[in-house]
Image (spheres, rainbow, N blue to C red):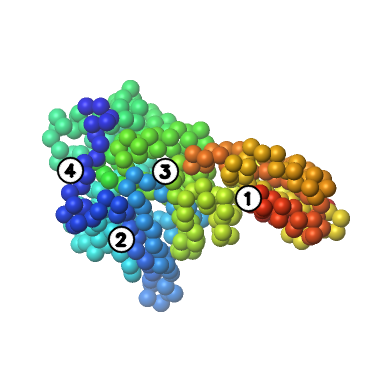
Amino acid sequence: MNAHSSVIPVADSAARQGVSRTDPVIRLDRVGKVYRPRSDAAPVTALDDVSIDVGAGEILGIIGRSGAGKSTLVRIVNALERPTSGRVLIDGVTISDLEESAARTARRTIGMVFQHFALLARRTAAANVALPLEIAGWPRRDIAARVDELLDLVGLSAQRDRYPSELSGGQKQRVGIARALAIRPKVLLCDEATSALDPETTQQILALIARIRRELHLTVVLITHEMSVVKSIADRVAVLDRGRVVEQGSTFEVFAHPEHETTRNFVGSVTGALLSEDLRSRLVSEPIPGGRTVLRIVFTGPNADEPVLSRVTRLLGIDVNILAGQIEPIAGRSFGTLIVAVPGDPVTVDAVRNALGRLHLSTEVLGHVA
Ligand SMILES: Nc1ncnc2c1ncn2[C@@H]1O[C@H](COP(=O)(O)OP(=O)(O)OP(=O)(O)O)[C@@H](O)[C@H]1O
């Protein structure tokens, strides 16, 4: 069998429950989770009114800082924990209501990929991939064929007999992904799947996840604290902050027009990396008389190819210093960022921002320098 023959069969549970093809594969409906560590301790709200839908074949990135509630969300989606309020539906089944034995069965629709791979050290790559099939009671011959197919899918056929200690981090994660896909889940839930990998290996693993999504029409949730992960392959992103979804939308739109401060910080962590350390350390939040204002201009549309800056400088008769710039693909579209310094008096700054706004370019004041 080749990789294409392992296309996941449409689960009959959806058809049985009258779920149409356009219904989300994952639905978090006003999910809340309150922990009460001890009876005398204050309750901790880990998730608060979280509503997220993930469509079939979609890659959703869920991004949040430490303590935002990401691990709690993973455990609830995976039916390892129950929400205190709200419900979770996977493929039309309300898994948040299920008893443990039914939850175990429902968990088979979800493949998990972990940050630290969670491989068994005493098993070879092939035997690690075989494990969920053995647990599910597959016949030995079918297991062998399926393991071959999975190792081929993730490009690890040559390493099948190696032990985890003989594999690189990226190879270990390929084994982890093959194992997660073994019993043909509908959903791949990746919990910081690339956080232990270097940037190059991260991109290779993300490319693998994107290809698998395409070939198997999988629905993928990427939980991460890194915007660069979301930027690479997520179609949509939800930003989690202190247990709440503060912003969600298409990855491109969220990058182009981040609304919440947390989102701006995440986006800035990627695009703001353009600023030199020296300049960053000199930026202040209040305008400096006679100084300059540093603006980030985002080019997202057809204007990316036009000489808009020179038009604006000619129109307003001002000097603009270009400090940094780049054009990169985000969710398959060109996304340009330019960081410039303009004369810092508020009237000029407003005039520049208005002129750029009329050209459909969004601007953000990053700060002021002497
Ligand atoms: N079992 C628990 N009992 C009490 N509080 C908990 C429990 N699990 C999580 N919390 C609290 O819930 C909040 C969210 O935690 P969670 O682990 O989900 O965040 P996170 O985004 O995964 O963080 P990190 O990236 O650091 O793992 C935190 O304030 C945490 O202290």
Give the residue type at disc 1: His
Tag in front: 1 or 2 = 1
Mark identifier at residue 88: 2
Residue 139 at x, y = what percent?
12, 35
Q: Secondary structure at mark 4?
A: loop
Q: Identify the residue position indicated by label 3 in the image.
A: 193
**Quadrant of the drawing holding the N terminus:** top left
Residue 103 at x, y = what percent?
22, 57
Residue at the outermost bottom position: 40
Residue 198 at x, y = what percent?
51, 36
Give the residue type at disc 4: Ala
Nearest the camera: 32 or 157?
Answer: 32
Counting other residues with Cα less than 10 Å from the Cα at mark 1, is it few (<14), some (14-19), or many (20 or more)? Answer: some
Among the two numbered marks 2 and 3 on one chain, the one whose residue lies closer to the N terminus: 2
CA distance for labels 4 and 3: 24 Å
Q: Are marks 2 and 3 in contact (CB under 8 Å)?
A: no
Q: Are marks 4 and 3 in contact (CB under 8 Å)?
A: no
Give the residue type at disc 3: Ala
Residue at the outermost top position: 158
CA distance for labels 4 and 1: 55 Å
Tag in front: 4 or 1 = 1
Among the two numbered marks 4 and 2 on one chain, the one whose residue lies closer to the N terminus: 2
Mark identifier at residue 264: none
Q: Identify the residue position indicated by label 1 in the image.
A: 360
Mark 2 Cβ and ligand 1 under 8 Å apart:
no
CA distance for labels 3 and 1: 37 Å
Nearest the camera: 262 or 163?
Answer: 262
